[in-house]
Each structure stands twice: as C-alpha cells, then as structure tokens.
Image (cartoon, coloured by chain):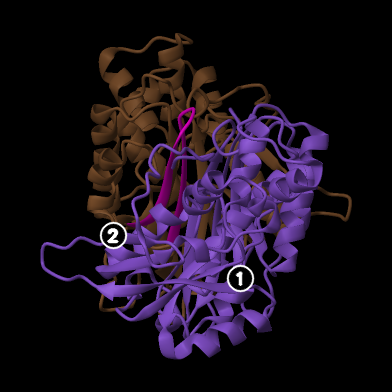
Chain colours: A purple, B brown
C-alpha cells in the first residue's frame, strides 16, 4: 500500500465488499484472497485491461471520467460475452496520492460499479508511473456465452449504438478536424464516458451467435470474429450507424472514424437471419439501437482467407485503405 | 497489443490455455473473456498484485527470475488461503518489445506456472513504463479457506521455512552489509526466487485456523491477523527460524531482517495447541520446515489493542524498534 494508506482506504476500501456476505460465503478485501463463485451452474467470465497514462488517456484527463472509463471498458468485455457483472479487482500505481484526484477517480469508478451491482473485491496500490489494471468478473451459463468463434454462414452482422464518435472526439482534441461546440461535446462524451452494453449482452443470450466489443475499430475487430469462426463477411459501409454529429463531418472522415476509429465499446454481433425480429425486440427492450450492417458467408475455397468485403449502399464493392489511421491506443 | 504482436503471441499465447477444454467448458485467451469455474462446491480464491520497476525489482533484474517472482508472489497469496492454483491473467506494459527479455521472462513465468498446473487464461499488453499486473485464481472449499480473521486464543503461531534472507540479499546488493560469495548466493536466491508454499497451504486445510503470507515482514504482517481476529500475540524472537547464512550476520541485523525484512513469502499461521503433531506431520509430508514461534491470547480488556509482545528465549520481554527499516517495497 502507499504510505498514504488512509487515503486509499478512505476512497476505496470503504466502498468495497469488505465483509463476508452471509448469502454466498464470498469474501472481499482484507484477506490474502477474495473468495468468489459464479451463480449455480454458471461460469465466471474474466477479463483484464491495463490503462497507461499518455497511451490510453491524456495526463490531464478528468479523473472522474477516467474512473468511469477504466471500469466501463472492462465491463464492455463482459457485455460482449453475455455475462452479468459480479465483481472486480483494481490494481494501480500512482506517482503520488493526490486527494482530490483519488476522490474524483473513485467517484467515477464506483458510480458505474454500483449501477451494475459490481463489487470491488480486491486490489493493490503502489507508487510508480500512473497505471490502472482492472480485472472484472461476470457470471454466464457456458452454453449461453457469446463467443467469437460462433459466427455461421448466413448470419447477419449487427452493431449496437453508433460508431466513430470517440475517434472523432480524439481528432477534435488533436486539431485534426474542427467541430462546433455541441458536436465537440457529443464526441467528447463518447470518448470519455462509454456506456458498457451489459443489458444488451444479456438480452442477446440465446439469440446472437458470435459477439465482441469494438475497441480497436470495426475493420480490425470484426476480423477477430471472422478468423476464429473461419468465415468471411460483407459489410455495407453506408449502413454503419453514426450520430448526427458524425454526419456533419466529411464523408472521408466519417468512413475512417466509423470503420477504423477505435474506442467505440459498442457490440458487434452475428445472429441468424431468422432471428431479426428477436434481435430488434432485444434492442427495444433495453433501449439500445441495433443496426444490421452486413452478412456472414462461408469461405469459398481452402485457399480463401477470412476477410471483410466492403460495399456501398448500392452494392458496389469498395477498396478501402484503413491501415495507418491511428486511434488512441494501438494495443 | 503491442505492434510487435507476433512476439507477444510467440512467447505468451503459445503457452496459454487457448482452446476450450472439453472437460469443464473453460475458455482461455482469444475471446473477450476467459471462462472459469471453481471445482464443484468450491469457490475461486482471487488475488492481484502489481509490480513496478524500481520499486519491486531493479531495472537490471534477471528477466527469468522476474517472471518467476511475479507469479510466485501471487501464488503465495493462494497458498495463504489454502487454495489450489487454477489459472492466472497477466497484464503488462513494456517500454519496448525486447525479444531476449520476453523469452527469458516468459520462461521463468511458465516454468513456475506449469509446476503448479496454473494456466494463463487472459491478459493485456501495452506500451509504457515497465509494469506487471497478475491476477491468480485458485479453488478452495469456503469452509476450508485459511482466513486472517480465524485466529483463536490458545493457538500456536507457526512459520514456514526461514525468514529474513530476502532482506539480507537486498542489504548485500545495496552495500548495507557484506557477506561471502556463498551466503550472497543464498540471500539472492531468496530475494529473486521465492517458492510459493502451495503444498503446505493445502496440507494445512482443516488443521490451521488463520494464515497469511509474509510479504512486508513478520512484525507488520502478523498484526493483520491479530487485528482481524481481535487477539494479541506473544512471539519468541529467538525461535524465529533463520538460515545458516543469516546466523553469520550480526545479531542486530538478524533481528531486523527476520522480524521486519519483507519479501519472505513464507506462511505465518495459527493452529490450536492440540494440533501440534498434525502441523508437524503436514510440514514433513510436503518437506517444508514449520517452526512454532509464539502463541495467540485474548485481549485483556476492552481498551486492549491487538499487538505483538516480543520475548527472547528466556522469556524476557523486549522493546523492539522495527519502524523505519525499509524493505524493497513499502506497499
């Protein structure tokens, strides 16, 4: 622990799951280990992410927003698995214990955690360059988990929400393109306060085949599904959902932000064509827009590689150059 | 991922639990989350540690030893809970992807992991100042978990192995005191290659009451048990086990290294006096020496605070000043 132990204790231990809970025998912080079990018949879905200053966030980031985002990007992985959040651990190194910074950071973190019933059950704090490492735990029936290797030929490809706003916000901050005050606020909110699509992930259990969350951009992330499922995709770039603010940027910037933007934390998932009404109903039920952007097909020969065929709304094939469009974190 | 993705893949993904295992439906790296369950009727014991260059290890540390130690200190937390290792996640930031460094680091890491049947199931890699964050998962029946709050008046206090060698090694490296080549090697091995007491932790299930692993020194760590169990302790400082190399240092240095040294990763546990033969038998069974160093007693009044009363072999009370003796990591 930092020598400023009482500060850490004040901002974190206080809101953590410290006491063993009578209902399930779990044990929170204060012992060598936390004790946790998934719900009966289920498994724990586990994901870990490390966020480094200057790489995943700016040194002058609003600490409340950082607390939110650090947990949000991890919860987004649970959403993409169809898992229900249960708990998380937090390890971080800090150059110094700054009371105002810790107060705001913990506020952003716990406000999100409490909305999803996700308890802090353990952690570690140390001195050093600013680094945050969170590990999240959710519960999911193994047969209902939304895996990357489950896409099937004939599936539709769906996207939640809209894409590209976070990258557009980074571009405005970097001076790559201008936007008016209102659009800048829209973009900045997308960049700083992504909302994990937990409720959608749960609603898609038993409906979707494959799913992942978009952190590095659609072009790169969808490929993960294609490779692990050994299939290919056709995507209508004009169907990719975007905000009104995004529509006010140039068509070229829109295309790059929506297809290779990164930091979206929306779900990309596949589902059989017969499930279209069920997918739309799931989206309505949780009040999260879902948009169909393409289809999955089988590889045509043994020499064929999983790849994305881009089309415009008229069905004309496009050759896109999306490499080299860096987003905030390239890892 | 680092742009040097193939290097990471080569050294880590290759030895990770990538494929779903038929026996239990678990899922390793390559998806949004890993899927893991404890053994039937058990719970997952979870611990996370962050290691920072310059604070927990020297910049010129042998990377193979670092790989070993990074996992060892986490497995030590499972040992202290009486949990059987199952899996771990690894997140790290690296200034650059150095092939020789990664090869040696991963070798040290996986050699230890494989000895304890502990699979890498997920992780994250990014650029940044060197920082390692591991989270380990073990399985333990909740009623058999060795908790810190379970010490009882009348319990003996036990220590595994010997204490102080790691701190003596740090002192030699820092030039605080000399040692000959053989003792230096002994100390250095203790500092760089602690052996997690997994088998002892398992053997103590149903025998020990409370347990923890010693990472910050006996004086500070034993207090955690006392505070959480609301009891006090009497410890014979001359009974604290030490190596022959340690015995060749001055009595004053011996006392400080063994009582406040840190980085020991030995178990400190309590067990009823009636279980002495069972404790000794458990130690013999796993070939790890166990030594009785004191006793637990009840607080004498409502004003009494959990504390350690130090005695010498003759039973004479000692007043020790152990504050200010810094070990390698003060957190």
Which residue shows up at 23% across the image and 44% down it? B10
Residue A79 versus residue A142 in the image, above or below: above
Chief secondary structure of the magenta span?
Answer: strand
Q: Residue furthest right?
A: B303
Question: What stretch of residues is rendered in magenta?
Answer: B120-137
- Quadrant location, the N terminus of chain B: top left
Q: Is residue B242 left or right of residue A299?
A: right
Return the residue at label 2.
A307
Q: How many other residues sit within 10 Å of disc 2, few (<14), some (14-19) or many (≥20)?
A: some
For the question of whether residue B194 can be seen, the reply is yes
The circle on residue A318 is: none
- Choose top left, top right, bottom left or bottom right for residue A72: bottom right
- Quadrant location, the C terminus of chain B: top right
- Between disc 1 and disc 2, whose residue precedes? 1
Which residue shows up at 53% across the image and 81% down it? A204
The circle on residue A198 is: 1
Disc 2: host chain: A
Asked whether A206 or B232 is in front, the reply is: A206
Disc 1: host chain: A
Residue B213 versus residue B7 in the image, above or below: below
Where residue A110 sits in the image (x, y, percent)?
74, 56
Asked whether B44 or A241 is in front, the reply is: A241
- The kind of secondary structure element at disc 2 is loop
Asked if residue B122 lies in the magenta stretch, the reply is yes
Asked whether A149 or A23 is in front, the reply is: A149
Disc 1 to disc 2, how far (Cα)? Answer: 28 Å
Where residue B16 sits in the image (x, y, percent)?
28, 55
């Amino acid at each position: 622990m930092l020598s400023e132990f009482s500060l850490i204790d004040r901002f974190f231990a206080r809101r953590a799951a410290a006491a063993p809970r009578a209902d399930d025998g779990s044990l929170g912080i204060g012992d060598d280990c936390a004790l946790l079990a998934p719900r009966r018949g289920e498994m724990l879905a586990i994901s870990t992410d490390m966020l480094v200053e200057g790489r995943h966030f700016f040194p002058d980031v609003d600490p409340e927003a950082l607390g939110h985002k650090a947990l949000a990007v991890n919860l987004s992985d649970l959403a993409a698995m169809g898992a229900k959040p249960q708990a998380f651990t937090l390890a971080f190194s800090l150059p110094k214990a700054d009371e105002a910074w810790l107060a705001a950071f913990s506020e952003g973190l716990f406000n999100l955690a409490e909305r999803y019933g996700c308890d802090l059950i353990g952690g570690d704090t140390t001195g050093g360059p600013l680094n945050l490492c969170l590990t999240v735990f959710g519960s999911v029936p193994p047969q209902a988990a939304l895996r990357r290797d489950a896409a099937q030929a004939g599936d539709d490809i769906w996207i939640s929400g809209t894409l590209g706003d976070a990258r557009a916000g980074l571009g405005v901050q970097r001076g790559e393109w201008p936007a008016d005050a209102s659009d800048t606020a829209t973009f900045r909110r997308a960049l700083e306060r992504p909302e994990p699509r937990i409720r959608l992930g749960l609603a898609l259990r038993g409906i979707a085949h494959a799913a992942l969350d978009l952190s590095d951009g659609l072009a790169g992330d969808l490929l993960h599904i294609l490779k692990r499922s050994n299939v290919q995709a056709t995507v209508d770039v004009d169907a990719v959902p975007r905000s009104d603010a995004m529509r006010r940027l140039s068509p070229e910037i829109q295309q790059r932000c929506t297809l290779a933007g990164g930091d979206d934390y929306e779900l990309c998932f596949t589902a059989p064509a017969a499930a279209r009404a069920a997918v739309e109903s799931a989206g309505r039920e949780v009040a999260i827009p879902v948009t169909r952007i393409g289809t999955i097909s089988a590889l045509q020969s043994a020499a064929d590689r999983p790849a994305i065929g881009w089309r415009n709304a008229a069905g004309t094939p496009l050759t896109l150059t999306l490499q080299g469009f860096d987003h905030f974190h390239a890892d």
